[in-house]
Amino acid sequence: MNVPLFPLSTTLFPEGLLPLKIFEPRYLEMVDAARRDQTPFGVVSLLQGSETREPGQDIEFSQMGVLAHIESFEEIKPNLYFLLCKGVERFKVLSKARDESGLWRAQIELLEADVSKPIPKELESAANKLGQVILSFQKHRIKASEMPFTQPYRLDDCGWVANRWCEMLPLNVAQKELLLGQNNPRLRLDLVNDILEDIQISIQFPSAQ
């Protein structure tokens, strides 16, 4: 499978939400093609370089990523798009090349989707803490459209809980890539739970309207 790539300074996880402002010609064309053909693009994490194109800049990015589907689209003005994307399948980059516009394309291999696994008793605290975060957003009257993840809230599923924490926790790219590459969602949640036990969570709320 050949897909265009969007290297970003963040890491997308399956079922995660990703808001994007698009203004570079290479990515405007990528989005136009994705909307026209109803196809996804791949999001990979930057290891070196910046999101915007700079002459002579060396770019290095993760060899693992997540396909993103466009959930909503708004053309704010000519050559400026606002997107809300949602993560779907994980993939591994097999080969990559840059075209004349500077857009990276890659031949990828899709990885197996998470098998639904119930939360074991010893990891219930991770799910309970995430439930408290959701309640806090709701108490602050945050609109569903402004929440960092979408319903249904599967607080009984290892993969879903682990992925939502992976998006919110202050982890570096290497840590997130390790978690993204963990094929067993129960083990991924186990690793996340170890992190949760070592840090204090601080939640930033968008302004309620």
Image (tube, grey):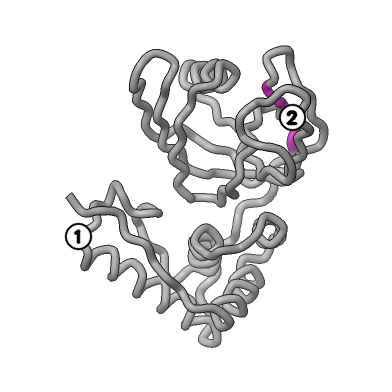
Residue drawn 65% across the image and 59% down it:
172
Residue drawn 51% across the image and 65% down it:
165
Drawn side of residue 92 relative to residue 158, left or right = right
Residue 121 at x, y = what percent?
51, 86
Residue lying farthest bottom? Answer: 122
Q: Is residue 30 visible?
A: yes
Drawn side of residue 109 relative to residue 160, left or right = right
**Quarter of image, res 100:** top right
* Tally of numbered tags: 2
Residue type, mark 1 in image: Arg
Q: Residues within 10 Å of mark 2 (few under 14, many from 20)?
A: some
Residue drawn 70% across the image and 20% down it:
102
Above or below — where is 13 with respect to 93? below
Residue lying farthest left? Answer: 209
Q: Which mark is residue 106?
A: 2
Circles 2 and 1, Cβ within 8 Å, touching? The answer is: no
Residue drawn 45% across the image and 75% down it:
127
Q: CA distance from mark 2 to mark 1?
A: 41 Å
Q: Secondary structure under badge 2?
A: strand
Residue 79 at x, y = what percent?
44, 16
Drawn side of residue 52 relative to residue 182, left or right = left
The magenta region covers 103-108
Q: Earlier in the sequence, mark 2 or mark 1?
A: 2
Drawn side of residue 146 relative to residue 124, left or right = left
